Amino acid sequence: MIGAGINRIDGPLKVTGRAVYSYERQDAGQPFYGFIRGAAIGKGKIAAIDTAEAESAPGVRLVLTHRNAPKQGAFVNKPTIFDRPHPQLTTDRIEYFGEPVAFVVADTFEQARAAAALVNLTYGREDGAFDLANHADQAEPQATLSIGLPGETRFGDLEAAMSAGPVTIDQTYTTPYHFSQPMEPHACLADWRDDHLTVYLATQTVAQNRIALAETLGLAADQVTVDAAFVGGGFGSKLYLHAEAVLAALAARKLANPVKVALTRRQVFTLTGHRPEMIHRVRLAATLDGQLTGLGHDVNLQAAVAEPWIEQAATVARSLYAAPNRLTRHSITNLDLKAAEAVRGPGELPGLLAFETAMDELAYALDIDPVELRLKNDTAIDPELGVPLNGRRLADCLREGAKRFGWDRRPKTPGSRREGDHLVGYGMAAGIRMHFQGPTGAIVRIEPDGRVIVRSDTPDIGTGTYTIAAQIAAESLGIGVDQVTVQLAHSDFPPSAGAGGSWGASNLSIALDRACQQIRNRIAEAAGLGATPNDILADVGRWFPEGVEATGQTIGQADDPNFKNYSQNTYGAAFAEVAVDIATGEVRLRRMTGVFAAGRIVNAKTARSQLMGGMIWGVSSALHEAAHVDPRYGNWVNGDLAEYLMPVHADIPAIETVLLDDYDEHANHLGIKGVGELGVCGTGAAVSNAVFNATGIRVRDFPITLSKLLSGLPPMRTAA
Amino acid sequence: MKAFTYERPASAAEAAAAAVRIPGAKFIAGGTNLLDLMKLQIETPTHLVDVNSIGFDRIEPTDQGGLRIGALVRNTDLAADPRIRRDYGVLSRAIVSGASGQLRNKATTAGNLLQRTRCPYFYDTDMACNKRTPGSGCAAIGGLNANHAILGASEACIATHPSDMAVAMRALDASVETVAPSGASRSIPIADLHCLPGNTPHVETVLEPGELITAVTLPKPRGGLQLYRKVRERASYAFATVSVALIAKIEEGRLTVDRLAFGGLAHKPWRVEQAEHAVAGAVADSIADVVLSGARPTEQNSYKLPLVRRTLAATLEHARAGASR
């Protein structure tokens, strides 16, 4: 059962509209609608605010501002991140463009939105720092990253290696602001009754957001119930508690009536989190035969003073290649923008985009096949941690990918292959992603009538968690998937580390399998009374008139010896072919192959879907995606999905996604590792490197848009 | 969205009359642009006159040998019409290069012509925009303007017109037929329909209050090779960086430009008639020199100058290749 590419068990609910998302929940009766009014300046204060007109608008029930908002728990910059309280409307200060300055509740959404526009605001605008490039000299080195890893690692002497050469690369790359932009916007329906708050919340972390909400509202955690039965994508942006949940809860309490809020698409830009813009400096030193003698990756990234998010972008090379001299560092530059957050493949997406592009530059400088260069610098031991790299199958991914893609047919000279109106190029890159493990519980119950019920607070954010939980339980108990009922994402269920960081499936599977083993033990004990375990499973009610249940637990990686004795990662290799219009510089992907090793796969279909999605993010990071800040005002200029470009169907041709048959015994007893974000690891650089191979033009400022290629393209016959 | 009243008249004359009877009224057809703008309170009509029941939803031959396209003909239907595909290929190609299938199913011929700019500062109600709020200034000038106008712009506005269809209509010398609230009808050459921004960028067309577009008329087919080349950062659902509508002919074995119009460059479809016949032999650079005379790019959109030249050269090459097949 584990590994089978079965269809999602919640698929029929979703395609028939019966999967009810937070904003659509009817459990609490007819709610009021809330709408957030955001600040029109990037830094300063509210000089005057007049709500009279809004309050007298049709249908309006409540207008909250900093003058009448209830007192809330103060923000605490806890290292656990997703359980931080986030009080709203606490002050007249404005720290980022779009920050909530008023919250209007009305009978209908349209009334609330119209009334929100009637709140009259006068601002005291102050000069702010809104662009990274012009403030990069204010970068501050960071000792510790947000996920707890060291901000700096240093081995040997990189500067000496760079001086010795003989072949070196020292280049600067910039990666822009990105947004997660899940299809379901951030939404919350809050119901306050009998001193208890129930929130139907679009979240990736039930237990953590419950604490965050409780601390914000000054409640005990057991006064808050969080229910996230269906979530329409998260990509990191629903790990955190955001304004809409807090404001809905405050208003529901004040009005003694359910209140719901969904962000508009434009507000998803202003009121959730972005990936910070980064300036990367990558240094590589190598011998003439391609042995790395030194590697360095420095990242300077945007942060906000109030809540720094130090994305682990310069960690990508730490476990990727051997080299005696190494230096990886992170620094932050505080700007007057909203706090950055984890966005799709934090660390790896921008880090590998820069680092693996630099590796390509080195391959050309050495005149060595880029695949060969990576193979030459492969390592079985983590070069920085000194422990074995378990499940290290980078070379297998590289070789299998090269074979499937037809890498031997690559144009060896950049800009040399022309097909009709296009320059055609091949590119490749290696991928690596840290495998994480977080504390997660699960409970399995077998009812007297034989029904099996599985529960955990891990949400299914669209990745297939309902389905894989059923598969694990079915395999563990030796029953059919259709005999298992899976209930997820409710704070009454055993807490988990949430669905993020590509760890939900492995965390939940381990805990669930243990719970099932516990139940099997109970049954085995009962079987001592004279029946076989199969007899008992077939007739649970006779042996356990009240039913039988057991819990299982996955421990956090800090407590797991596997994570001390081994360097835990997943691996991939990506190969891309692009065509660049020789006249216009338009880049279009022609095909792409990704080969991945991510331990044992629980569901071949959902894993493939996630990896394919990740590969498309890679294309997006190389060619399309960038959110732009106006450096005069600090606002997101292209704040809608017409102007914030991501690939559409027409941009994505055949993508081959290959999962190596794998089982990682050093990861956990099931051999499972994280899958979701691995797909993006290296795929952006594969596309970027293909553009260079096609054109001979190296663009180091991502994304690679046509205006950056135009001046380097061959001259056109524009004269007679 | 502000509250509004709504009516659905049964004829064009009633619709035009209704639109002036209530101050602040607007027509709605497909709604693919207007509804978005209403949600953002960029458009705040007090009254909507829904023109979907007035007829004008057919494509019919004219006495002059051309076609009259009803204002309510959907973009999808127009692009797929066999007469359009056969005789006005540039129009069909331009339409299918725009928006998405879903939007084209809903959007109408008249609505497409009247869609408003996609300048992001126009869409952000916290930013200054002379088009949205006359006299408030232009945040795009001095802001992020890589995809803004290089021709015909002003100190008040550097927005572009986003339509692909209109560029092809301009190349084809279409005319816009209207009916006024008085019941009077007139025909406006498409060249005269859209205004340059000047000091009044909020005035986008020459239509009078309540004047309703009922049809777009195409003259008799011009023949020739008809191409539409749209340059953009992704393969679909993106506005043009530059687009070229070209009708080319072979005369005495040489390619000549019959009609040439550009999108993505200005506040209206950009056509310079002198460029079409002034240069024998269709030399791209010479044509582009004429088209681009007076161009005033910003630092960020100056790449459009070489892009126009290169795209034109490539499109002419395609025409040559097409002619020799």
Image (cartoon, rainbow, N blue to C red):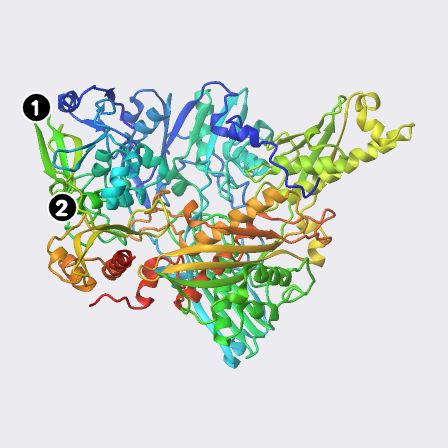
Give how far across and how far down residue A214 sits, in percent: 54, 33
> In the rendering, at what x and y percent does residue A62 appear?
37, 24
Which residue was labeled with disc 1?
A: B182
- Mark 2 lies on a secondary structure that is loop
Identified at 30% across, 43% down, the residue is B98
The total of numbered circles placed on residues is: 2
Q: Is residue B126 visible?
A: no
> Which chain letter matches label 2?
B
Q: Which residue is painted at 39% across and 58% down in the image? A: A704
Q: Is residue A203 above or below residue A623?
A: above
Which image quadrant for residue A526? Answer: top right
Q: Residue at x 59, y 40 (%)?
A: A498
Please determine if labels 1 and 2 lie on a single subunit: yes
Looking at the image, tell me whether mark 1 or mark 2 is earlier in sequence order. 1
Mark 1 element type: loop
Residue A257: which disc?
Answer: none
Tell me where residue A486 sits by quadrant: top right
Label 2 Cα neighbours within 10 Å, binned few <14 / some 14-19 / many ≥20: many
Give x and y (percent) for residue B134. Answer: 16, 40
Q: Is residue A84 visible?
A: yes
- Compared with residue A426, is residue B152 higher up or lower down, i.e. above or below? above
Q: CA distance from mark 1 to mark 2?
A: 27 Å
Q: Which residue is mark 2?
A: B196
